[in-house]
Amino acid sequence: MTRTEFPPEWLALRAGADAAARSTDLLDHLRPRLTAPDLVIRDLGCGTGAMCRWLAERLPGRQHWILTDRDPDLLARAAAALPAGVTAETDLRDITRLTPADLAGTSLVTASALLDLFTSAEVAALAATCVSAAVPALFTLSVTGRVDLTPADPLDLDLAAAFNAHQRRVTAGRRLLGPDAADAAAAEFTRLGATVRRHPTPWHLGPAQSPLTAEWLRGWVSAAVAQQPDLAPAADPYLARRLAQCTAGHLTATVHHEDLLALP
C-alpha cells in the first residue's frame, strides 16, 4: 500500500491538530514497558515524520527510529526533520508485509492515521507480527466515522454516510477497514492475548484552524461524492455554504478519532 494520496502539504496542515488530539494518557501505560536505555522505534507509514517529532520528547532513553514508508519523498522529508537527540534510518517498503523477524530488537511499533487504510487481513497480520515479537504497538488517530458540525446542515448525515462508505471501499482488490479499523485492531490484539487500551482523540476545529477545516471539508465532500455521485447537485452548494461559514469563523467541526495501545 502507499500514501501517495496524502501530499506533504496536507500532512503539514494537519500536524497541529494531530498533535493536540493524540492521547498522552496512553503513554502512562506504555512507558513502564520501555525499560531499555536504548529504544528502537519503528514508525509505520511515517509520512513526513510527525509522529516521531511528537512522541520522541515524551519517551525516555536514547532513541533510534526506523522510519518506514513506501513513499521515498516522504521518507526523505521525515529524515530531514528529526527532533533533537534522535537518530534514525529510513526503510522503503510495503508496510503491510512486516514480519516478526523485521521487529527483532524493536522496542515499540507506532503508526498515525494508518489503520483505516488497512484491510481486515492486514490488521490481523500486523497484530500477529507485533504479538509474536512481543513488541508494544501504539496506533494513533484512526478515524471512527463520526463528525459533528456546528451549525448543523440537512446534508451532513448523507455526506457522512457516503464518506464512511468511501472509507470502506474496495480499491485494487483490497476492502479497506475505514472507520472499523480501531475495533478490528482491538479485537485482533485482544484475541492474541495482548492488553488493549483505547482513548478518544478528536480534532476540535474552530476559527483558529480554518485553513485545515476548509481543506478537510473539500476532501470530505469530494470523497462522499465519489462514492455516491447522485449527491453532487446538492454537494456543490453545500460546500460553498460551509466554506463561507468557515471563512467567516462561524463553523466548528469535531472530527472523531481514536488512539489504541496494545501491550503483548
Image: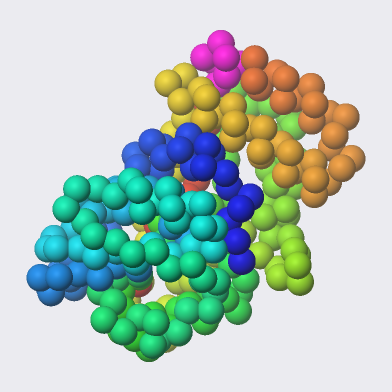
Q: How is the image coloured?
A: rainbow
User: Where the N terminus falls, by quadrant?
Assistant: bottom right
Residue 1 vs residue 191, the one in the foreground: 1
Residue 22 shows in this picture: no
Image height check: is 255 above or below 75? above
Residue at 80%, 45% (x, y): give it: 226
Residue 156 vs residue 32, the one in the foreground: 32
Residue at 39%, 88% (x, y): give it: 101
Residue 220 in percent (x, y) is at 66, 39
Residue 209 shows in this picture: yes
Residue 127 in percent (x, y) is at 45, 79
Image height check: is 135 above or below 226? below
Left or right: residue 172 compared with residue 74: right
Residue 34 vs residue 158, the one in the foreground: 34
Q: Which residues are magenta?
A: 245-251
Q: Identify the residue at the far top of this view.
A: 248
Left or right: residue 93 compared with residue 153: left
User: Where the C terminus falls, by quadrant?
Assistant: bottom left
Magenta highlight on residue 140: no
Image height check: is 135 above or below 217? below
Residue 69 in percent (x, y) is at 49, 62
